[in-house]
Amino acid sequence: LSKDSNVLHFYFSEARDRLKQIREEQSRSSREVVDIWEQFLSYFSDKLGNDVWPVYEQVCIAACDCGEISLAHRCVRELNRQFPKSFRVKGLEGMVLEANQRYDTAEHLYKTILQDDPTNSVAEKRLVVIYKSQNKIKEAITELRKYLDSHMADTDSWLELSDLYLSQMDYAHAAFCLEELILANPHYHLFHQRYAEIRYTQGGTENLLEARAYFSQAIKLNPNNIRALYGLFLCASNLATKQRSAESKNMKYAAWAAEQISQLYRKLGGRGTKSSSDSTEQIKALGGMFDKLQLTSS
């Protein structure tokens, strides 16, 4: 580093502002955070003033992500000196224990925090992470359901719970989680798509009809959703073989979805770096795939 004070001040300001930007964007960028701290800011921490405490927290989390356990310990030690009774700092201690694979100790720490502060959402979520890390899926589901009883607006947790249920092939409960998400955000096409996929997986005429409706809604909200278009095609194809009275209607749905997918692939074929011959071959292959899926009644 140059000894010129103006140059040092410039680098210091750049490093400090970059860490602040990462915090504001809620982007972990863990390796970058650790490198900025170790290569520069750690030598000038006294110049950060009160900003040093959020920086210590940020660096601690990043160090846990990168497996830099000794650095994480140093950050927690400094934070404990300043905030000796902080539940937030105790939560960071738990994360360091997790990074060191001391799950039992971390679990005990989080439960102790919850005894003193039953509404501590960080401790509740970290318990879920611990159970997932040890493949204790049933315990993770129980803990996450308990958390959602008092934090029903947390969409990320509903998605997480849905994924946990899917890992156990509990499609009914996974669908319920998506229903809650759709109620909270009815205009987000991916929630409709995921709900439809679960209903399609469950099978049966009633579930296929519901899946068709939700795939259609996902397409209405986002006409470029190829996955939803393909889901509609599959639902309509299956229903055409099951419901003779509605066969022609479902065949029309399937034909429309297939045409929309083909059009999207043609549009994509004119972009990117692939040659026109490669794009033509892809479109032909797609058409062949649809031709093989005959829509015939059973």
Image (cartoon, helix red, strand yellow):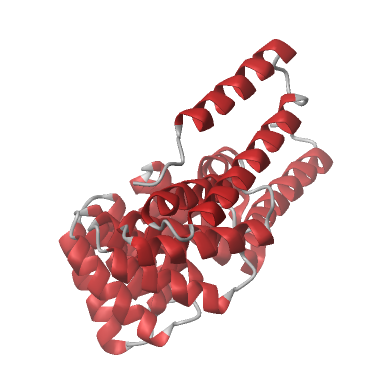
**Which residue is rendered at x = 74% and y = 46% of the image?**
14
Q: Is residue 22 above or below residue 122?
A: above
Q: On the rendered structure, is 37 left or right of 75? A: right
Residue 218 found in image quarter: bottom right
Q: Is residue 131 above or below residue 15?
A: below
Q: Nearer the viewer, residue 43 or 148?
A: 148
Q: Which corner quadrant holds the N terminus?
A: top right
Q: Nearer the viewer, residue 36 or 123?
A: 123
Q: Position of residue 282 (x, y in %)?
A: 61, 21
**Which residue is rendered at x = 36% and y = 62% of the image?**
205
Q: Position of residue 164 (x, y in %)?
A: 30, 61
Residue 55 visible here:
yes
Q: Is residue 43 above or below residue 135?
A: above
Q: On the rendered structure, is 268 left or right of 105? A: right
Residue 85 visible here:
no
Residue 161 found in image quarter: bottom left
Q: Nearer the viewer, residue 230 or 112?
A: 230
**Which residue is rendered at x = 77% and y = 25% of the image?**
270
Q: Is residue 279 above or below residue 3?
A: above
**Which residue is rendered at x = 25% and y = 66% of the image?**
140
Q: Position of residue 153 (x, y in %)?
A: 50, 80
| Residue placed furthest toward the front | 245
